[in-house]
Image: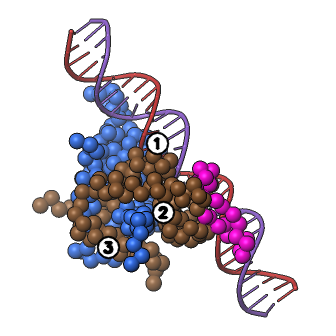
Chain colours: A brown, B blue, C purple, D red
Amino acid sequence: MGENKYDCLRLENQLCFPLYACSKEIVRKYKPFLDKLDLTYTQYITMLVLWEKKEMNVKEIGEALFLDSGTLTPLLKKLEKKGYVSRSRSKEDERSINVSITPEGETLREKALSVPVEMGECVKLTPEEVETLYNLLYKLLKKCNCKDEK
Amino acid sequence: MGENKYDCLRLENQLCFPLYACSKEIVRKYKPFLDKLDLTYTQYITMLVLWEKKEMNVKEIGEALFLDSGTLTPLLKKLEKKGYVSRSRSKEDERSINVSITPEGETLREKALSVPVEMGECVKLTPEEVETLYNLLYKLLKKCNCKDEK
DNA sequence: TACCATTGAATTGTATGCAACGAAATGCGA
DNA sequence: TCGCATTTCGTTGCATACAATTCAATGGTA
């Protein structure tokens, strides 16, 4: 019934679309909570990795977040201006920039503890569904990220 | 072991992150295929809904794609300039803009048929996994999209 | 019918994302 | 050690995204 050669072009037959839409909607959900920290979503996930590692260079942050220097350089400068991170040339390798958490950035971590709690209340999936979704996304991410050919 | 109060802030404990990263990586995967059609990803999904409905106003497109006029207005003007759609004031409601597919846009649909095929080869999940992922994403999207309070 | 809240687009301002390019530093082989 | 490919950031240009605002058209309602 209703089969035609264009079915594969229907929005509802694309896996990419719910992925794209979900990502945007979730990021939008974060906004009111992140506003209280004066962070955007991208700044927030940058702080997440920095809170863990304390010090990373731009390349390492980029690999962790799937972002390049074109996005990160201006973003890190903004975080520096807000006082949450400091940036300095590495002494071992002058090409590299060390980005590290400041005491103010460390203080922010305390305030950020409420964010996952508040967001958790927004995601109405069961723990099993979250687990399944999480695993499939990481699987896709891994398949996706490997070099295209070979 | 290693439990601490900041565990909830670890990047790997966030569902949002693989969602965000996957979405970007998939969109990036589309690029070489969409370049052949002279479309960006957002322009592509806009064409997808328009190919189906033939004519929609900006509000309807926005509801289908989770985009607002701030994104769509300039994007639709670009698609118009490329000759794939036409834009005109609705006669029934002068506030509304009717966006419709042109013959060139219809021709483009033929070329676009190869895109899902080429992309399908990039996504190395089983059909069952794709199905599960798809359903969970739509479920999340629905939960997410409902009005926040009440 | 005059008033006014609502609606649909467009505009403005800010913040990404990313490809492409540039420049300086590094490293490696002849 | 010289030359050159590679690496790491930064910059530029283009295209989203979205909140907030504006403006014109519309739709009740007194």
Is B147 or A35 nearer to us in this picture? A35
Q: Judge left or right: residue A59 versus residue B12.
A: right
Q: Position of residue B37 (x, y in %)?
A: 43, 59
The residue mark sitting in front, 1 or 2, is 2
**Amino acid at pointer 2:** Leu
Is A101 or A41 nearer to us in this picture? A101
Residue A7 visible somewhere in the drawing: no
Q: Which residue is mark 2?
A: A48
The image quadrant that residue B16 belongs to is: bottom left
Q: Position of residue B24 (x, y in %)?
A: 43, 62
Q: Position of residue B117 (x, y in %)?
A: 33, 70
Q: Which residue is mark 1?
A: B74
The residue mark sitting in front, 2 or 3, is 2
Q: Tell me the quadrant of the picture where the N terminus of chain A can be found.
A: bottom left
Q: Chain of mark 3?
A: A
Residue at 51% over, 60% down: A47
Q: Position of residue B131 (x, y in %)?
A: 23, 69
Residue at 45% over, 46% down: A36
**Amino acid at pointer 3:** Asn
Measured in 3D between alpha carbons, the distance from the residue under mark 2 to the one under mark 3, in whole angstroms, is 20 Å
Q: Chain of mark 1?
A: B
The residue mark sitting in front, 1 or 3, is 3
- Residue A82 among those drawn in magenta: yes
First to last magenta residue range: A79-100
